Image (tube, helix red, strand yellow):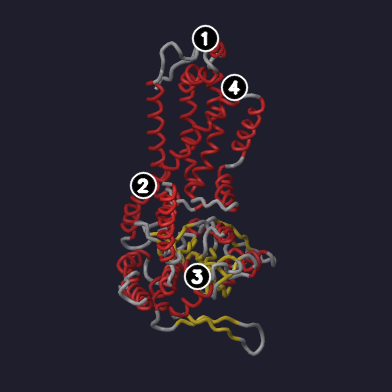
Amino acid sequence: MRMRIKVLLAAVLVLAGGVWAAQAEKYIVASDIPWPPFEWASPSGDYLGFDLDVMRCIAVLEGYEIEIQPMAFDSIIPAVRLGQVDIGASGFTITAKREEVVDFSNPYWLSNQAVLVRKDSGFKSLDDVLCCGHKIGAQRGTTGADWVQSNLVDKGVDVKLVLYETYPEAVLDLVNGRLDAVVQDEPASQQSLAAYPKVLTTAGVIETNEYFGFLVAQGDPKGLLPKINEGMVKMGLRCDLMRPAEGQWKVKLRIIPGSAWDYLVRAYFGPKLEKVEAAWKACIKILYDKSLSPEERVFRFAKCLAEKASE
Amino acid sequence: MVSREGGAINHWRNIVEGLPSLLKGLGINVEILLGLISLGFVVGIIIAIVQVYGKKCFVWPAVAYEWFFRGVPELVLILLVFFGLRQFGVKITAFFAATLALGLRSSAYQSQIFRGAIQAVGHGQMLAALSLGMTRIQAIRYVILPQALRLAIPPWSNEFSSVLKDTTLAYAIGVEEILRRANYLRMRDYLITIPVFIIVALLFLVLTYAGNWTLGRLERRFRIPGFEVKGAREERL
């Protein structure tokens, strides 16, 4: 009897092992939802956004599965370091400080900081705004807040930095006149403008030249970075290193026109969020249509999303 | 501050579309509540009994336990459990981390509720039970606890309302409870921030009222005429 149980157990284990081995690897992607248009959740519970769809497309191209885990922004790097999640995809600016504790993929996005003001404030240029005891709002822990602190406050420019947990509060205070300006990532600032088109305008853009990257644990223990970088190339993003005659190496991002990457950018940066949500619902099944090749699935999905969202 | 032509209608639609998501989130809050309050109940009673009747060597750990879990802020506890257990290789979901942390904390508070209630039952009853030949455990089980639990209902409903609201702290570690979903909604449309938070507040008011009403019914249902604490007045409501 004992023997029989042992044999049975062994058979079950072997079977289970076979089934387990046949499944694709699954990695957990952490993202600070919501931060549209890079990541947000629709009322019906879908996780959308540029970062997340790039992650999905790369997973299809490289033959692994992902699970998206919402998480507070500050918690993502600790979670990646502890091995609780595998990839951080949340509009992370690549900074030297972060590179000390995690490893980044190639850059995938160049972002600058927009300076939002009220239309009735009469500010003509950035110089009018960033001086004269003005109150400037930003989200705590973001590179925008860092920029104001290190380039204005620390250098003795007469401005006051006011920090907020999230951007809507800062924008609301700007609208209500408690702030003179809000410094916010350029793509995300489009949404603030869309919320108050008659009240707000962009006074100018501070060229902070921040590159976003996806991040993994130090040393890339699961070997994900080569796959992510390869996937981005397959989708149509080129990352060229350039060195002007004198000075430092510079990164230049180039998007191949008509590529999947190009379509994803067009889908997410421009159309209203509600339209993107409707388009996403209609197109997402293409990405998982097993009758097509991975490349075709990614391309058709991105194209469908861009076309439906801008209808 | 309606911005666009016809903008107001859009905002209403965004709120209405978001309601099912908020209710689903509230369901998660209730799940956390049920988990944490049952955990707190069981552990709390054990701690209370140990504190009142336990041998000296058990009393001190029980007091230290209560001191720790009543002294650390809830949010810190949640983060400690979530990240701390991972450090030791225990894979724990955000939902369980929140329930466990809040449940342990609640057990410390509940232990004090039960300790007070047990002590309110006259010590003479314990002596009487022992003199009748009951063991200590039998005396606790059949004489002390049935009375103490009845006395504990009013302060316990206070703890209930308190931990019900604490469940929103699970937001911090990514549990998709109502507050996180409210943030999902308002980040899609900044202008519905205040209405969405008002809806969340109203839902919690309803839930707290329903919970306390049920506990009030329980209190009346289990009341034994003649065994109230001497001189106590009934509530008028």
| Amino acid type, mark 1 | Leu
Residue A233 lies, with reference to residue A136, above or below; the image says below
Judged by depth in the image, the label closer to the viewer, 2 or 4, is: 4
- Are the residues flagged by discs 2 and 4 from a single subunit? yes
Q: Helix, strand, or loop for circle 4?
A: helix
Q: CA distance from mark 4 to mark 3?
A: 65 Å
Q: What is the distance, in whole Å, between disc 2 and disc 1 at their CAs?
A: 54 Å
Q: Which residue is mark 1?
A: B132
Type of the residue with mark 3: Glu
Residue tagged 4: B53
The three-letter code of the residue at mark 2 reads Leu
User: Helix or strand or loop: what does disc 1 sit on?
Assistant: loop
> Could you tell me which chain the residue with mark 3 belongs to?
A
| Residue A146 picture location, percent across and down | 62, 65
According to the picture, the residue beneath numbered tag 3 turns out to be: A186
Mark nearest the camera among 2 and 1 is 1
